[in-house]
Every structure is written in C-alpha cells, then in structure tokens.
Amino acid sequence: MRRAILSSIVLCAAAIPTTASAIDFDPFVIRNANGTGDAPSITENLAQDGALCATPLGGQKVGYGTSYFDGMSFDSIQTVDFDRVSGPTNIVPYVNVWITNGSGKYAIISTENDYRGQNWATYDQFKVFETDETDLDWILGDPTVGQDAQKSGSQYLQKFDGVNWVNVTGADILATIADPGVYPSPPIGTGAPKNGTGVNIIWGDTASNYAGVYHYDNLTINGMSVPEPASLALLGLGGLALLRRRK
C-alpha cells in the first residue's frame, strides 16, 4: 500500500506545467550571417516568460534557451506552448533541442510546422541537424534491438517500423538532452544554438521566411518529472501526511 501511495505522488508531479520564468530561459543572439544592415536582437519579457525577437534580414538567428532539462531524456518533454503577442501568423518560433548519447555523439532535434500545445509523444514532425548523418540509430536507443533511424530527403528524422520508413515521434527519441559544449565544423554549422543550453526556442533562419519581428509570451513546457521545487516540497509533505495517516 505504501508503494502505491508513493507512485501516485510521482504521477501528480509529472503533470505540472513549468513556466519559462520558473526554469530561467536566457535570450541570446546566434548569428548575423548577413553582416550588414540591421543587426538581430532579442529582448526578454519583464515576466520572463517570452521574448521579442527581431531578425530583420535573412541569415540572422536569435534564441531563448535553458539548461533546465539537461540530463533528462528527450521523451520526457510532453508539450511546449506559448501565446503569440505579435508577428507573422503563418510561422512560429521553432524548438531546437541538443541531444547526446553521453559518448561523443550529438545532434539537434528541431520541430517543424506548428507544434504548440501538441502532445510530443505522438507529434511526428521532428527534423535532425548538426550531426553525423551516417549513424542516427543511437537517437532511438539501443541499435542492437533493431531500431534503425535515418534522415529523410525532407530532413525529417525517421525510423524503420519493419515495413516502411516513418517519421519518429517524441516518444521514440530516447537520447539525453544536453548541449555538447564543443562545436566542430562540420558537422555543426553557424546557425546552431551555442549558448550552452539544451532546449532553445529559435527565431530566424538562413532563408528570408523568418525575417522580421515575432513577440511571444506565456511560454510553458509540460514535462515528466520536472515539477517546480516549491511544488515538489508540497507534494512531499502531502505524501508524508498520507503515509502517516495510513500508519
């Protein structure tokens, strides 16, 4: 009975959404590849839950990153969401997540299209970049059990399901979130976030489709096992009370 009560406490903790202000995102400029004209900029909201991103020209990028999730498995992230304050309605800032196997392999998993509020366990629009593309099996876990991965012609990360190559979901990606700390070129290009942060919200691109201004707030990430410290303490006290009552 005691074990069952403790399991309930863990499940409650897993359902807590974590806001940007609670997990300390930092704004940073990734690059100004254009080199002339208006420079890119990013300014964090006073509430620390979003940013005003400006990339006036193609080849510019800015990021809003955190190390809060470093050391966790990629599949622990359940949803990422934010509210658009102003900016284009047909595109949104995308997410770049650095992953590693802890033994020298690394990659960036990037969202495609509008992922906001979608369940990452079933969302299947992830692309892979900044990595040795000849070996991607490690991203899905132990390759000895037949989990084969590849990068499609459209850059999507795919797995072989025994019959066909299909896009992976967030639940398939078992690698650990962490910035590698080293950025050899190749394979890591100048557009990769290099702020030392594992999870990054990105605005800008090499193409001009992301040129302009985008402002977002109310950024939240719902992840397994990432409750805020205060919430954890409350859950712990509640669990102790339950155990004491059962005694």
Image (tube, rainbow, N blue to C red):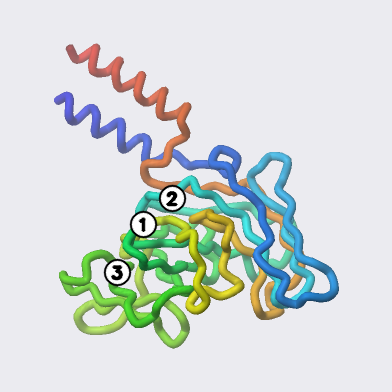
Point out the image quarter for the N terminus. Answer: top left
What crowding class fits label 3: few (fewer than 14 Cα within 10 Å), some (14-19), or many (20 or more)?
some
> What secondary structure is found at the residue carrying circle 3?
helix
Identify the image quadrant of the C terminus: top left
Mark 3: which amino acid? Trp
In three-dimensional space, the C-alpha distance between marks 2 and 1, rounded to whole angstroms, equals 7 Å
Quadrant assignment, res 240? top left
Which label's residue is closer to the chain start, 3 or 2?
Answer: 2
> Which residue is the site of mark 3?
138
Q: Is mark 2 on a helix, strand or loop?
A: loop
Q: Is residue 67 above or below residue 35?
A: above
Circle 1 packing at 10 Å, graded few (<14), some (14-19), many (20+), is: many
Label of residue 70 in the image = 2
Mark carried by residue 220: none
Counting from the top left corner in percent of width and height, residue 24 is at 58, 42
Q: Quadrant of residue 49?
A: top right
Residue type at mark 2: give it. Answer: Asp
Check the image and name the residue furthest to the right: 37
| Mark 3–mark 2 CB contact (< 8 Å) | no
Q: Residue at x 57, y 62 (%)?
A: 194
Residue located at (69% from left, 77% from top): 209
